[in-house]
Amino acid sequence: MAPAPARSCSKCSAPAVTFVRYSGQHLCGDHFLHFFEKRAKLEVARRGRLPHGTIAVALSGGKDSVACLHFLEKVSRDNPKVDLVAVSVDEGIAGYRQGALDICRRVTEERGVPWHTVAIRDLAGYDIDDYAAGGGKHPTGEDRPACGPCGVFRRTGINTLARELGASAVATGHNLDDTAQTVLMNVLNGDLDRLARLAPHDAPRPGLVPRLLPFRSIPEKEVLLYGLLEGLPIHDEAECPYAARANRFRMRDVLLGLEADQPGTRHGLLRFHDRVREAVPPEAGGEVSACAACGEPTSGETCKTCAWRA
């Protein structure tokens, strides 16, 4: 059987590189890049504008964060009021993290963006491989997946670096799939407080650098295509060896199934979160105060970082 003829771009006569199912468009490389960046710019505009001053890009070396740094460098290149820095956290995961950090070094050097790193070992007193091997316990005394301390110390490390650098915002590469998974997890847990606190943040809270998510409405596969078309390095090693036990990855599989059966599910969850943000006042997410032990911001008496620290 002869192969099906290539489809042409819906905007021009060039061959299409992708079909955007939810918009009904076949797009060539150039028109896809325009389509992608237009939506990322619109998400930034919804927050008002690109913040002036220093923007810290949370750079893991994965496709999403590298694409985020690339996009922000492009749109801020001629803006003298914006300075980019990159901040990374080394979790201490052998055979996985080093390749990604090498990519971080490469993309920041190529773009002349200062790069700052911190290791979880310096924050926690152990690295994630140590914890997974039995060197750490959940604060309740139970054995838990390594994602618990990893997530806590990654957030702490990024926020601390950004604050020390005087950043007005932290930009992350979280995409539509990431956002929809987080919203679904909090809905299933009935956690309105967390829903109210989810990024993006429109107003600063004491000790916390506001988060900016340019790719929040863009599907993960489109972020990957953007990176490939722009010639960005892609971290091709397997996913984190501890990820299989994470609840987020179960939510990922659930959402992929729902999206296949009912296209638009992810966008629906995003719209739901926007409605929650409009209806629920920011203070509903809980008061932020200083941790009694270390002074870092927390919604309780002591912060999770202190609870997890060795």
Image: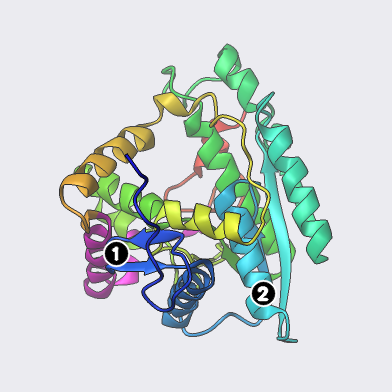
Q: Position of residue 291 (x, y in %)?
A: 54, 50
Circle 1 SS class: helix
- On screen, residue 130 versus residue 289, left or right, reads right
- Mark 2 is surrounded, within 10 Å at the Cα level, by few (under 14), some (14 to 19) or many (20 or more) other residues, namely few
Determine the image quadrant of residue 167.
bottom right
Is 278 magenta? The answer is yes
At a point 27% along the width and 48% down the height, the residue shown is 186
272 to the left or right of 32: left
Q: Amino acid at mark 2?
A: Lys
Residue labelled with disc 2: 74
Image height of 164 relative to 76, above or below: above
- Residue placed most toward the observer, 109 or 308: 109
Image check: 146 left or right of 267? Answer: right
In this rendered view, identify the residue nearer to me: 273 or 306.
273
Q: Which residues are magenta?
A: 266-290
Q: Position of residue 158 (x, y in %)?
A: 63, 52
Residue annotated with mark 1: 284
Image height of 70 relative to 54, above or below: above
Dominant secondary structure of the residues highlighted in magenta in the image: helix
Residue 305 covered by magenta stretch: no
Q: CA distance from mark 2 to mark 1?
A: 36 Å
Relative height, residue 191 to residue 51 (above, below): above
> At which x and y percent is residue 49?
52, 84
